[in-house]
Image (spheres, helix red, strand yellow):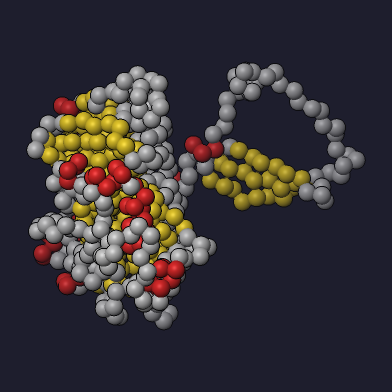
Amino acid sequence: EICVHSNDNGGNKASLVVQHGRLVPPAVIEMPTAAKQPPVMPLSLPTAASGLAPGIKKLNLNAMPNGNAAIASGEKVIGEGATMQSPRATTEAVLSIHGVATMRARPLIILDARELGMSSLQPAWQARGPLLAVASQNERGLLVQVYDTATRAKIRSHQFGKGAAISCEWDCTGTTLAVTQEGVGIHLWDAGVPAAGVRGGTGPPSPRPLALAHTATATATCATWSRCTEQLAIGTAAGKVTVYNKSSAVVQTSDRKGKHGAPVTCGVWLPDNRLSLASGNRIKLSKPMAPDDVEWYTQVKFKLTGLASRLPKKLKAASAPRLMAFSQGPVPYVAVCVGEAYLLIFSTGADAGVNDDVGLSFPDDYGAVVGFAWDANELLLIGLSNGLVTIVDFPALLASRKQPAAPPAVTSATTRIFQQSLTCLRRAEGKGLTCATGDSGFKILSTVAGGREPQVLADVPLSLPHHLDHHIDSCAWDVPGRRLCICATDGQLWAYEVEDVSGVEPAAGLREASNGRQPAPLPGAPPSSQPVSKPSGDERSRNTSGGQLTAAYRL
């Protein structure tokens, strides 16, 4: 129990009491007048080296359980609520920038198949750092390389054997890279530690990747680091859950408590260090894990058994969750993609009397779900492969269902973002921006509270070689939302620094472009109306500023 007291000028005392992580309503206590109060004697404690008295420990308020009573516990059946179809777009016109772009993407580094190989890529930004790790495939197998985008230099490279990369991710300290290799296991690489001859480092030589219990991780299907601690969660094809604690170098598999009856398909860490893993017909959410813990304790198990009765026949064969995202509220909402184009949205709340899950389907000609994300206002953005984005205001949807007599509210809308295709949708945690890739470029989007249509802040075209069946397929943000990379299936990668230019006067060429006229070429830009995506290797070494001007002209 924690009690916080304060005296006002009138001699009254206000008390705030926190009991077991819950705030008790404040009470006002009448105090005697100042004349009747006993004198206050100063309290003096011996000072230890830590600044506290011997035997006294610091109270970490951040470690207190937050909202435990509001989140469900035990089992909760999902899939018995209403089913709805997303609305069709009111117009087929592609959403564009209104006026002048307010965000700018400044090129940092451009890579191609000569360095990465002709394959799909797995990029990973260092947490709050300039390093970019890229996992790719070449003729020898899996290749992982680390680039310093501040200096545009490759600082580390390691060639693994055969086996594609399932995932590639830095830990929250930006020190260790975890690479999950199909059929082999997980490799841990301290690629973020300054080493002799690398970025001015004076430490030991660059370490080699280490195998993390390949016997237990050879069948790993997903691996993800905690957002705030050095804990790596691993799900396997056998439905087992393994947690690796880097600080204590302990690996533990939960054979009973966290085990799933089917292969684990996806996993997400929440900000309060809860872990959620999904499998065939269930989603498990753990209790908050202590920084030194490796054991799973289940908070709630969501059973998707009610889903089978209403799932369209064409989706029942592929009914395992493949994508999952949690909102940012204290009692978060969950969105789960089942099959190609069916979304299940529900609350983690403990109110058993409220049927708060909704099944969302989409018109057949809108394509498959390629990604989705919650914004700070608990709006859900859903990217569809045929170039559209649907926004669902789930709290407003639940409120309208609880008041059926009220006039129907507009709780969702669909907008066309690209003319042909949308391949990826990712949200940056730091700045609240969303990147959508498609056609031959990418757009940076934002949302506003109560809005049903995203705003385009930047529209960046990219020049792609004409390779059959190759296209832009993914994007990745760093944690603060300052850096962004775009990847194509032919081994091309573009890395940018995203800047806010809302208060900057646009250049003359950009003003003319926003008015619908062809902009005048900037000095050093190519005369063609379709700027080249990147200079050749020789040109890049002689004139790097020319490449930057080309990208600025493209914007």
- Using the image, determine if residue 222 lies above or below residue 523: above
Along the line of sight, the residue nearer the viewer: 509 or 239: 509
> Residue 412 location, x and y as percent?
34, 72
**Which quadrant of the figure has residue 293?**
top left
Would you place residue 390 above or below residue 202 in this image? below
Q: Is residue 127 visible?
A: no
Vertically, is 408 above or below 360? below
Q: Pinpoint residue 330: horizontal percent, then vertical percent.
A: 45, 51
Rendered-image quadrant of the N terminus: top right
Nearer to us in this view, 479 or 350:
479
Q: Looking at the image, which residue is at 27% across and 67% down? A: 529
Quadrant position of the C terminus in the picture: bottom left
Question: In the image shown, does 236 or 229 lie closer to the viewer?
Answer: 229
Residue 13 percent location from the top left of the image: 75, 46
Write down the quadrant of residue 264 in the picture.
Answer: top left
Q: Position of residue 237 (x, y in %)?
A: 15, 40
* Location of residue 64 with respect to 525 vertically, above or below: above
Identify the residue shown where x is 47% and y is 60%. 501
- In the drawing, does residue 295 fall left or right of residue 10? left
* Residue drawn at x 54%, y 38% as measured from the top left: 61
The answer, for residue 510, to whether it is visible in the render is yes
Residue drawn at x 64%, y 23% is 51
